[in-house]
Amino acid sequence: LGWMVLFCADPSSIVNTKTGADAGHIDRAYFTGFTLFTLGNGDFVPNGPFWQLVTVVSSFSGLFLVTLSITYLLPVLSAATQKRQLAAMIRDLGADPQSVVIEAWDGKGFDMLMRKISSTLSPMIHLHAQRHLEYPIIHYFHSNRVEASLAIGIVILDEALTLIAHAAAPETRPHPSEILHARRSINGLLDMLGSSYVRLADENPPPPEVGKLADAGIPMAEAAELEQAISDSSQRRRLLRAFIEDAGWTWSDLSTWEFFLHPSKEDLEK
């Protein structure tokens, strides 16, 4: 539109190649379009050296715009796909924090889960955080399905790590360095989000339920330890809540994921 307005500044800037008559406004729009998209000369040409130079500059800007758009959009689409892939991989671990812990329990500990986080999930979360810096628009690619939301998945994973680190009995827990390593990637993502995209939620989210863990036969620590850990991580959990709400969900949607993955007969009838 800007280039068309510029070409309209002089009534004789563009002329018809056959008749030599000055181009009309529609003709100038047509000339601007095929110049910007580097389609070559059409039925209209610039009139005089100055407008020829202006046409060259406009053609270069069009070539730059098209090339930049393609080289930017393709990585963005790839990053959006990997974002959904990461959400799906976390979803496969379990439908909610308690399910992740229960499914990871092997009777002695949670080694398989920690290995998967360390080898696969943590690098992908680090990469996703860096993609936010390279392509800020990726933050605004939100899923309209709760089971495909990365925000929900990240919070489920973090809450599961909290349960393993502070609700399970000490003898069943991984080495503290493994928990720290697993948390580091999520910390990086949260720090980036907190600095540029979201603000702390006004209220702390409710603490995770531990009843399912005991029912599954997982040895449990004293309840006071989990309560203290929840209190100490208040700011972090408020940021997690803000992450979920920024994506269009609520904290209660953490349990909604269970319905999509493992709906009961009663739920389906409803």
Image (spheres, grey):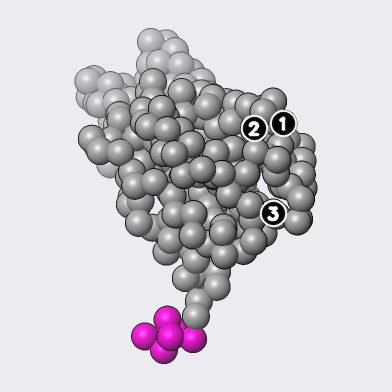
Horizontal relation, residue 188 to residue 25: left or right: right
Viewer-nearest residue: 146 or 264: 264
Horizontal relation, residue 13 to residue 261: left or right: left
Residue 74 visible? The answer is no
Q: Amino acid at mark 2?
A: Ile
Q: Where is residue 84 shown, x and y percent of the image?
A: 57, 50
Q: Amino acid at mark 3?
A: Ala
Q: Where is residue 102 shown, x and y percent of the image?
A: 63, 58
Horizontal relation, residue 252 to residue 162: left or right: left
Q: Which residue is mark 2?
A: 179
User: Residue 204 lies in what quarter of the image?
Assistant: top left
Residue most toward the front? 222
Point 39% across, 20% down: residue = 195
3D distance between C-alphas at marks 1 and 3 = 16 Å
Q: Which residue is mark 1?
A: 175
Quadrant where the image shows the C terminus: bottom left
Q: Where is residue 248 shown, x and y percent of the image?
A: 33, 50
| Other-residue count near label 1 (Cα within 10 Å), few / some / many at <14 / 14–19 / ≥20 | few
Q: Which residue is mark 3?
A: 104
Q: Is residue 93 above or below residue 113?
A: below
Residue contact at pointers 1 and 2, CB within 8 angstroms: yes
* Camera-side mark, 1 or 3: 1
Horizontal relation, residue 251 to residue 162: left or right: left
Q: Amino acid at mark 1?
A: His
Viewer-nearest residue: 63 or 178: 178
Report the predominant secondary structure element of the magenta stretch. Answer: helix
Magenta residues, start to end:
265-270
Residue 258 visible? The answer is yes
